């Protein structure tokens, strides 16, 4: 064997080994992506819930850069192309769009089957109704940094149209990213404002993220505060930062106060809430797309022990808790509660498909806990009445009363679309189109 051939082999053999190992690893990852996609289709959750990526397969090279960038592991590679394999995991971070080396990804709202209503807004974030502004997720932008930017820019427009007499300059509805930035901008501009938040804490959609979930993937710039140079931050860290900002700047945010009606008045609007009424020249809606929690409409629901999402399972340790709902959020809440020492968990579903609707992982875990008596499941059931220490449930026509310390309703939310249309705001339904930026 000649010396040149030996040298060639010394270079080629390691290179061949690298290619073989790379190919094997890629095939293994693609098999995992195929399995995830098949499970998604079987579970009937193949429709994304919010802002999500659409991949142009003619441009996609299958580099996997978007897969690595996605903090929610929503993307995978199938047949050499990027695919949204877990659509229900995607919460619109947008890191995939930035990471794609060939610009093959577009962020969109809605799909061909499931349209999403997006109000029409001008570049100033004013709707077709003068004085009504929309910023953030409700207007078609789910990214935190973009919501922050839009909230601040909306105030730049609003400050040119101040209130008269005892009118407020603006009522800001929602204390998520867009609402918080708008509140800071309003205070910086010396505007007369109040910010309404139906929850008992800051954050909007972020407030409802699971513990330790990655909340942001790019820096943002806040009025008064300046640039927040964090590329990755958890829910807890972000909420802690926002709460510190509110304390330092003394923002006028009125928690647990929900807007109920928005009507025109002389030279402005009247905003009626669960606690008060406000005359204002302008209204900025920064409420996100969770909307108002869908209620059960039963006696006793107004009690403090009834909430509409699970924030921290530990606070229910040792209590009797009823979860109401039939989807993944209800299943995950029941599983988290059952993991807490001494907690007695019941789950009430209006249908008989609680063991088929959630993802396979949740279904399997829920079935196991139900079989072991860790979670009591009521199917074809409706809550009839909530009392101080008990709940009455109608299961298949039979009333059952169970001991209860807390009720967690996981029944989704309703957007104010009818109210917007009633006051004349134009709303367009998007079926997978890119939302104008």
Image (spheres, rainbow, N blue to C red):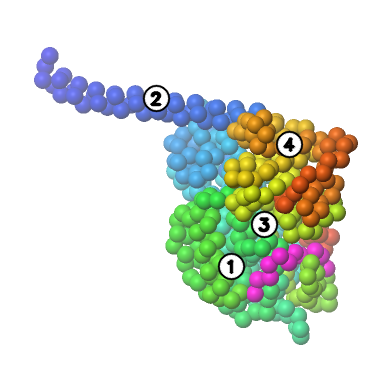
Q: Position of residue 3 (x, y in %)?
A: 10, 20
Q: Does the magenta segment cover residue 254?
A: yes
Real-space Cα distance between discs 3 and 4?
32 Å
The residue mark sitting in front, 3 or 4, is 4
Query: What secondary structure predominates along the stretch shown in magenta?
Result: strand
Q: Residues within 10 Å of mark 2 (few under 14, many from 20)?
A: few
| Among numbered discs 1 and 4, the one appearing first in the sequence | 1
Real-space Cα distance between discs 1 and 3?
14 Å
| Among numbered discs 2 and 4, the one appearing first in the sequence | 2
- Do the residues under discs 1 and 3 have CB atoms within 8 angstroms? no
Residue topped by disc 3: 288
Q: Position of residue 74 (x, y in %)?
A: 55, 39
Q: Residues within 10 Å of mark 4 (few under 14, many from 20)?
A: many
**Residue 377 got which mark?**
4
Q: Residue at x 65, y 71 (%)?
A: 253
- Do the residues under discs 3 and 4 have CB atoms within 8 angstroms? no
Q: Residue at x 40, y 28 (%)?
A: 25
Can residue 389 be seen here? The reply is yes
Q: Quadrant of residue 245?
A: bottom right
The residue mark sitting in front, 1 or 4, is 4
| Among numbered discs 2 and 3, the one appearing first in the sequence | 2
Q: Residue at x 69, y 65 (%)?
A: 197
Could you say which is closer to the camera, residue 60 or residue 155?
155
Residue topped by disc 2: 24
Real-space Cα distance between discs 2 and 3?
43 Å
Q: Residue furthest right?
A: 397
- Relative height, residue 425 to residue 106 (above, below): below
Highlighted magenta segment, given as a residue range: 252-263
């Amino acid at each position: 064997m000649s010396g040149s051939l030996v040298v060639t082999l010394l270079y080629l053999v390691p290179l061949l080994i690298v290619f073989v190992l790379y190919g094997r690893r890629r095939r293994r990852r693609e098999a995992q992506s195929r399995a995830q996609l098949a499970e998604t289709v079987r579970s009937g959750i193949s429709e994304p819930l919010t802002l999500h990526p659409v991949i142009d397969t003619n441009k996609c090279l299958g580099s996997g850069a978007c897969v690595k960038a996605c903090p929610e592991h929503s993307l995978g590679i199938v047949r050499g192309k990027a695919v949204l394999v877990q659509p229900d995991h995607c919460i619109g971070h947008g890191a995939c769009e930035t990471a794609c080396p060939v610009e093959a990804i577009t962020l969109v709202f809605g799909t061909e089957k499931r349209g999403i209503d997006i109000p029409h807004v001008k570049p100033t974030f004013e709707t077709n109704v003068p004085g009504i502004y929309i910023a953030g997720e409700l207007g078609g932008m789910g990214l935190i940094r973009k919501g922050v930017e839009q909230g601040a820019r909306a105030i730049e427009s609003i400050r040119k149209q101040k209130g008269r007499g005892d009118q407020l300059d603006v009522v800001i509805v929602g204390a998520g990213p867009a609402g918080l930035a708008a509140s800071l901008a309003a205070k910086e501009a010396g505007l007369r404002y109040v910010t309404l938040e139906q929850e008992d804490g800051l954050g909007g959609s972020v407030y409802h993220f699971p513990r330790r979930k990655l909340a942001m993937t790019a820096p943002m710039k806040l009025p008064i505060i300046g640039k927040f140079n964090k590329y990755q931050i958890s829910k807890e860290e972000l909420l802690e930062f926002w709460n510190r900002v509110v304390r330092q700047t003394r923002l006028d945010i009125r928690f647990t106060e929900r807007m109920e009606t928005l009507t025109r008045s002389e030279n402005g609007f009247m905003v009626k809430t669960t606690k008060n009424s406000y005359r204002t020249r302008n209204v900025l809606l920064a409420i996100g797309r969770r909307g108002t929690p869908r209620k059960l409409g039963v006696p006793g629901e107004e009690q403090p022990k009834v909430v509409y999402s699970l924030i921290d399972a530990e606070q229910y340790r040792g209590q009797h808790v009823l979860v109401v709902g039939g989807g993944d959020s209800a299943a995950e809440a029941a599983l988290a509660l059952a993991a807490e020492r001494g907690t007695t968990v019941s789950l009430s579903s209006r249908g008989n498909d609680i063991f088929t609707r959630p993802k396979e992982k949740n279904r399997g875990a829920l079935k196991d806990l139900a079989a072991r008596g860790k979670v009591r499941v009521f199917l074809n059931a409706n809550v009839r009445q909530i009392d101080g220490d008990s709940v009455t449930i109608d299961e298949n026509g039979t009333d059952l009363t169970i001991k209860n310390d807390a009720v967690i309703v996981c029944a989704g939310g309703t957007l104010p679309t009818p109210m917007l249309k009633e006051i004349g705001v134009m709303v367009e339904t998007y079926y997978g189109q890119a939302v104008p930026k």
